[in-house]
Amino acid sequence: MQFVETPEQALVAETARGLFADFASGLRATVAGGQGYDRAQWANAIGEMGFGGIAVPEALGGAGLGPIELALVAIEAGGGLWPSPLIPSIGTAIPLLIGTGLTDDVPALADGTKIATILFVTDEAFTRRNGGWHVTARGLAPFADSADLLLIVGGTRLAVMTAFEARPAPSLDLTRPLAAVTVDGVAVAVVDEAGPAIADALDRARVTLAAECLGAAEAALARTVDYTKQRVQFGRPIGSFQALKHRMADMMIATEAARSAVLYAAAAAAEMDEGFAEAAAIAHFTAIETLRRCAGDMIQLHGGIGFTWEHDAHLFFRRAQGAATLLGTPAASRARLAGLIGLEAKAA
Amino acid sequence: MQFVETPEQALVAETARGLFADFASGLRATVAGGQGYDRAQWANAIGEMGFGGIAVPEALGGAGLGPIELALVAIEAGGGLWPSPLIPSIGTAIPLLIGTGLTDDVPALADGTKIATILFVTDEAFTRRNGGWHVTARGLAPFADSADLLLIVGGTRLAVMTAFEARPAPSLDLTRPLAAVTVDGVAVAVVDEAGPAIADALDRARVTLAAECLGAAEAALARTVDYTKQRVQFGRPIGSFQALKHRMADMMIATEAARSAVLYAAAAAAEMDEGFAEAAAIAHFTAIETLRRCAGDMIQLHGGIGFTWEHDAHLFFRRAQGAATLLGTPAASRARLAGLIGLEAKAA
Amino acid sequence: MRLGFTHEQECFRAEVVDWLETQLSGRFAKLRHLKSQSAFPEERRAWERTLAADGWSVIGWPKAYGGRDASLAEQVIFAEEYARAGAPGRMSHIGVELLGPTLIHFASDEQKARFLPGIASGEEYWAQGYSEPNAGSDLGSLRTRATLEGDEWVIDGQKIWTSLAQHADWIFVLARTEPGSRGSKGLSFLLVPLRQPGITLRPIRQMNGEAEFNETFFDGARTAAANVVGGVGNGWAVAMGLLMTERGVSTLGQQMGFIADYDAIVAVARANGTIDDPAIRDRLTRAYAGLRIMRATALRILSADQLPRAALTQKVHWASWYRDLGELAMDVAGQSGEVGGAGDEPLSRMADLFLSTRAATIYGGTNQIQRNIIAERALGLPREPKG
Amino acid sequence: MRLGFTHEQECFRAEVVDWLETQLSGRFAKLRHLKSQSAFPEERRAWERTLAADGWSVIGWPKAYGGRDASLAEQVIFAEEYARAGAPGRMSHIGVELLGPTLIHFASDEQKARFLPGIASGEEYWAQGYSEPNAGSDLGSLRTRATLEGDEWVIDGQKIWTSLAQHADWIFVLARTEPGSRGSKGLSFLLVPLRQPGITLRPIRQMNGEAEFNETFFDGARTAAANVVGGVGNGWAVAMGLLMTERGVSTLGQQMGFIADYDAIVAVARANGTIDDPAIRDRLTRAYAGLRIMRATALRILSADQLPRAALTQKVHWASWYRDLGELAMDVAGQSGEVGGAGDEPLSRMADLFLSTRAATIYGGTNQIQRNIIAERALGLPREPKG
């Protein structure tokens, strides 16, 4: 037991921090652009830097590291609110494909040359026709208009689609826009009766999302601290007022708790710990709630400027909400946790 | 419409305030005594001052005023944490007996010569035997060991008992102790099919209880304000620290909201307003939650001394919890409100 | 203490309902249930003039200034029926609710005669010039200055969060008229024509994409020497009086708007089944209770002879309630509420509530400033040491 | 970053489990699952001596002082298994967890030789003398004074919240040794024999009826001149170092106690059916998540070479969690939990949790003080102006 980053892991985090800090200057331009992400940044971070394959086995073209390193990268991406298909394509599609053995496209996803997104459905969306699987579904999926592959995720079934319609929708979350997806066709590949593999892969995805939320929450706190040290009212920096200090202290209590939850879940994933599903549920709801709180407080503590379009605070706030529904809600993770720890009635 | 106390009502409140302030010096002695209330204070406030009959029609020996005046008295009694059977006997039993027409004992309750308490049961506790009603029940009832009458309250049935066993129990709420009651006998009087009358009387009782909680919450705030103005740490009164100021501001926001809710519900009761049941539910859960919060904050803001036995803060805190289960929980009142305002699924 | 209305008051209500129904079914139908504060400016001016023509524009003002001297009950009835009918937000709000009562209390007879009729008749519209970029919560740090040159004040500086300025004719400005003065001293309350070369407006886009507020730049702007209210150097007292009038009958109308928001959320919850979620149902129940309590508090305040302590708690209470409502709206809507609707709205009403309600705890005095006020003025707690 | 344990560590665990099971099934069975901190003092002394005899009393201390130089993993294993086995609260807690590490860091070799063996062997017990009636959160206002008379310090004053003093032999006292000094200057850290005529103890009864703490009156109390740690006038630095060691492995043991409380609440919820209430179930779920997160945070802190910023957040986090747990306990118990049980307990365990947890956010630095520390030391926010 040694629950601290190794020097190698610290280096991964530091490298990612520098890269996403460089990207951050382009945030507004990317958000204002039509596509929602910057292709050059994507190729750089995912391909050249190798962050797309960091948790992918070497046999599939990855770096052969694991969930901890991916979480460290996601934390830094979250800190810059990096607008990109990181979570759907790298964080979710890759573990789903690896977990279900549909690994053909993994190398292309890992090096960023292809992008995947996911659509959650019930198993009824899948029907057998002429020996193959036909999928019929509609819904919202992040970056679907930029995606090469669409993963259709049911409770026990998973399909890979290459033919689907995607219409970009004006989205609350400006840094991870949704598109309206319509699917009605034959799947390129399908697995059936894969409930446990899908559940485990989604838990891994939720941990990566949680890491990204943690990074955003920590950034929201850091930027709020910086602002309140500078902004003077009533003859002193507003960060010297106890009510504001205590609010920021509470933000930090929340981010440190979320950091513990996220790192623990990532380590549990890496070690295939039997408590991983629990840890993933805890990390997921804790990190999302922490981001929502910190983003809301960021607006509040910035005062008037905090609710202007020009200030980034609302981008954090919007991201928090987008994250809260992307891979299931915090409430759903709490309900799942309740089941895992035996909090059912009269079960004693 | 004029939502402010009349001069007569203000006088009732002022008179009550003086009386309960006088009583307050005996609080610790009464609590330490075996009976849980002071017979002389009871005779004084309920009998001589006439507070027991304030909302009782003149025909039944009362003053013929109404729920507003009773609420104003209860607020002041709450402010002094007056340990007495006020809520069960005056606040609950009297409206139950008047509402169901079993008024024989009302004059004796109103002048304080008899004391009543209540036990909540399901209708199954009542059985017809030999043309009369037999009641079998066990449970907890406040001041049952001092009570002359026990009202057994079912969903649609109400019985008056004079023969019952009551064993005082060491109670969390030191100012309104519970006793373990066992009933197995013939009722002195019973009404059947009285669901609406019982519900309305209990709503009235809940408003009086809410008023008492409001008074206690306001007193908790006032005492906390006084203390923090006096107590010096770090070279200044701790009440000048913004974190404490803001906490007390939040206490006041809560008490003022509770005051609005309680007075509105009392006025709605007085006018038999069609929105009374709603208003009663709102007042009930709001005032109890406000007291719980203010009592907890009272402990916190007093620091170390706040969690000693010698300081009164824990008496407020204990009272809050006792109130939260006395006539149904705050959660139950919210659930009832949800039903009253049509928040059922798919009912649109 | 009495909640109910007399027969006479119910007759008044019927008159109000009838008038509103007639107008809003007829030529002003397009203004009904309008959310935007900026759409249809011409129709809204016409609406204001129609209100004035039939005596409904300033019912709470004294008769001497064009009002009706309406009783509390009548004002409550009017405010609630106005909102219930879906009548549009008052373009004249700042003049009718804020400046008018301030002028009635502080202004000279000449000033009253010059400015009150324009407000009452719906001919002149007002904007508010208080906050500055470096004086948000801290009005004592105002830097905008006005200098008397001959018979005119010349004004230089910058105001921010000027609401509705794009539709206004005049602006009231708190400016420093005593050079070198600090804090609340040396300020004057000036009435300034808004449409002049010395004034430039720049809209501020809010996080929900709307632009309700402006930055207002004064660069040698001018107004007559006589347009100072309450005397030169006495601007702080006038401004504080004005801020107090914000807690008037208009809060009841505001609350009716909250009811419409609440109803919209309940409708979504029913439609998508989240009303079956006990946690959502409980939050909706609490939201409803909050509405009822805010109404009761408003009635308590309006019924009192003097502004009670409870009045100081109103702003934080409603603002926090509203912010929570915005979060509830989004939790009810779920992911499908995070994208634009089929119509021309860029986002769903739930998403807009989620975003727009965040401003409630900031504008008009942040929750932090309000809590200071409650602690010091209502509870008598000591001030903090100065920095 | 690694959560799991090596085979060697699992062998260590087996050894710990085996030892505890043997002892606690045998002569110390009556101490198992004991909640009270004051019952069976003689048996508890014997327990401490037995721990010491078998080398379990101070495993984290260096071998030179009687410890085992146990690794982090071993300390975690011992703390968690100790609590899991229901072994009793350590009467030696203050000596082992607080004073010992402080002496190891600050004391002279003579002092170490005199005092560490008594702690390690379970022969000498310690109490803590920091707070005073007028210096609760504000330790800089301490007034207890010590004057050197010949080769002895003579101590006068009063300490409060002295925990476990009724069972202690010694007390460490932060006293003012420089007359007229103020704030953190002029203080010394003294080791004082507790059982002497110059010291009087008065128990403080807490709101739950227990008396874990004392007031301690010093009236010409004496200790040898040599019993000052870290040098005369340097008491503040020593005291601060001691406060930092409070965030050690012992938190893991504390958390195991929390797990027992949580389990007890779940058992009541199952028995009375409140577990069917979705709101209760959700609160239980959050409480469980809090336990897991607190454990992970403790592991992060213990694994780090230097005390990380996160360590500063631990106290508020667990204290607030525990206070919330107390409220949950009562909501689960309902009215039937508000009265004494059939046994000799005056109140139910749920009611006791409800009451006793209120102290968590106060002692050891109130939540307010802790938030100041986080804001200033971890976030670098400016101090408030002095009053």
Image (cartoon, coloured by chain):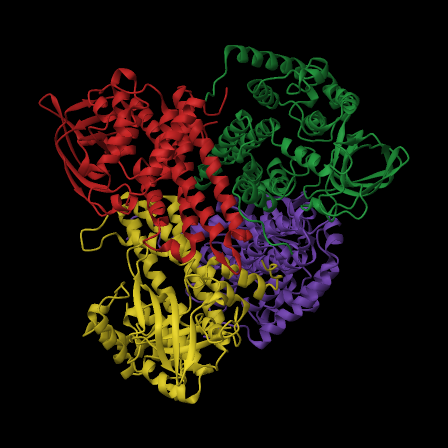
Chain colours: A red, B purple, C yellow, D green
* C12 left or right of D125 in image: left
Kindly tell me whether residue B279 is visible in this rendering. no
Total marks placed: 0
Task: Where is residue B177? Give x, y as percent.
Answer: 66, 48
Q: Position of residue D222 (x, y in %)?
A: 87, 35
- Residue farthest to the right? D150
Residue A13 sits above or below residue C354 on the image:
above
The foreground one among D35 and C317 is: C317
Residue B91, compared with residue D43, is above or below; it is below
Up the image or down, A48 lies above or below A329; here it is above
Task: Say which of C178 and C59 sits in front.
Answer: C178
Q: Quadrant of the C terminus of chain C?
A: bottom right
In this picture, residue D192 sits left or right of residue A11 = right
C207 vs D211, nearest the viewer: C207
Residue C189 appears anywhere in the view: yes
Q: Residue at x 70, y 16 (%)?
A: D64
Asked which quadrant contains residue B109, the reply is bottom right
Provide residue B126's location: percent of width, then percent of height: 52, 46
Q: Quadrant of residue B91?
A: bottom right
**Position of A324 compared to B332: left or right?**
left
Residue D288 percent coordinates (x, y): 49, 32
In the image, residue A169 above or below residue C110: above
